[in-house]
Image (cartoon, grey):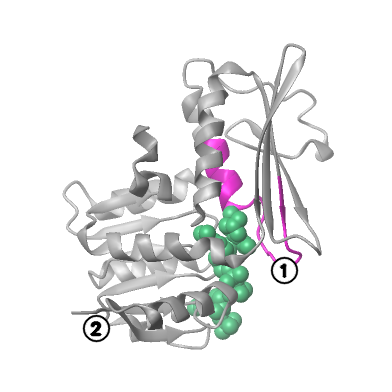
Amino acid sequence: MAYAVAVVGATGRMGTLAIRLIEQADDLEVHAALGSADPIDAIEGADLVLDLTLPAVSPGIVDAAIARGIPVLVGTSGWTAERLARVRSRLGDDPQQGVIVIPNFSLGSVLATRLATIAAPWFDSIEIIEAHHAGKSDSPSGTAIRTAELIAEARAEQGPVAAPHADQRARGQQVASVPVHSLRMDGVLAEQQVIFGGTGETLRVSHQTVSDASYEAGILLALRALPATRGLVVGLDTLLGLDRA
Ligand SMILES: NC(=O)C1=CN([C@@H]2O[C@H](COP(=O)(O)OP(=O)(O)OC[C@H]3O[C@@H](n4cnc5c(N)ncnc54)[C@H](OP(=O)(O)O)[C@@H]3O)[C@@H](O)[C@H]2O)C=CC1
Ligand SMILES: O=C(O)C1=N[C@H](C(=O)O)C[C@H](O)C1
């Protein structure tokens, strides 16, 4: 049996990639391929929903899937801790349905974030620089938001990072106390560098995406994990068990 997937954002860069992957997989099939002009009701009858749209649109799609009892995989950015908390409370204490939110489908990126959380308690001075293609409409990136929030979580005992002169605009946007600097420019696909400043040394954890092919294995892994998921799961690291490594 093949799971029927409704892809929302199917006309976009990531949606087009997802449709191709689903069409090529024996255990998945396209139920509906939706763009901005299509009614969300078209997800009805799908086994799974895949959301690859815009940060402003994504929460409504998740709500629509939850309302219809359809498990949903979210690849769209903009899912802050606050937004995730709202979904968790919407699903309730004994959720029978799965919602998976993956800020970054690439293995290298989630490993880089994991490495950053290991270093986080050891350095008080931590900043993130992320760069993306000029067409990306949101900043900071979903990956940077997630990385900053996990760094803050890993520093629960040490407290917020030092962010001197944070009132100056060029000092970036603080996410969970971590300054994030976003570049949007030609010649870049997606990159992130987490810089740790210590006594007489810096440590840099850096990841570069050179092709959208880096997302393919993660998309398939998360779609296949979705039917058995109950409640909210965040991050490819969780699906891979890296959060316990
Ligand atoms: N998790 C990850 O690893 C990755 C996540 N992303 C994220 O995925 C998202 C999509 O990126 P990308 O494909 O580059 O973006 P695109 O701009 O190429 O595509 C956006 C898609 O959203 C659709 N859309 C816009 N508004 C609505 C609406 N109201 N209802 C339904 N669909 C709508 C568009 O449809 P239309 O064509 O009709 O306007 C289009 O299909 C972004 O948030 C990006 O950050 C990107 C790469 C990797
Ligand atoms: O828009 C993109 O391209 C990407 N968006 C995601 C994000 O906001 O982190 C994931 C990846 O960085 C590519």
Question: Is disc 1 surrounded by few (<14), some (14 to 19) or many (20+) residues within 10 Å?
Answer: few
Contact? badges 2 and 1 (CB < 8 Å): no
Q: Residue at x 51, y 62 (%)?
A: 215
Q: Report the magenta residues as a range.
A: 130-149
Q: Would you say residue 137 sits in the magenta stretch?
A: yes
Give the quarter of the figure containing the C terminus.
Answer: top left
Q: Which mark is residue 23?
A: none
Q: Nearer the viewer, residue 147 or 225?
A: 225
Mark 2 lies on a secondary structure that is loop
The quarter of the image that holds ligand 1 is bottom right
Residue 31 relative to residue 164: left or right: left
Q: Is residue 76 visible?
A: no
Q: Amino acid at mark 2?
A: Gly
Q: Nearer the viewer, residue 110 or 82?
A: 110
Question: Is disc 2 surrounded by few (<14), some (14 to 19) or many (20+) residues within 10 Å?
Answer: some
**Disc 1 beta carbon < 8 A from ligand 1?**
yes
Residue 94 relative to residue 51: left or right: left
Residue 49 relative to residue 211: left or right: left
Q: Amino acid at mark 1?
A: Gly
Tell me residue 132's x, y (percent).
Answer: 71, 57
Tell me residue 157's x, y (percent).
Answer: 47, 15
Q: Would you say residue 82 sits in the magenta stretch?
A: no
Residue 112 relative to residue 184: left or right: left
Q: Residue at x 80, y 60 (%)?
A: 185
Give the labeled residue for mark 2: 45
Q: Residue at x 51, y 26 (%)?
A: 118
Tell me residue 242's x, y (percent).
Answer: 39, 39
Mark 2 or mark 1: which comes first in sequence? 2
Q: Which mark is residue 135?
A: 1
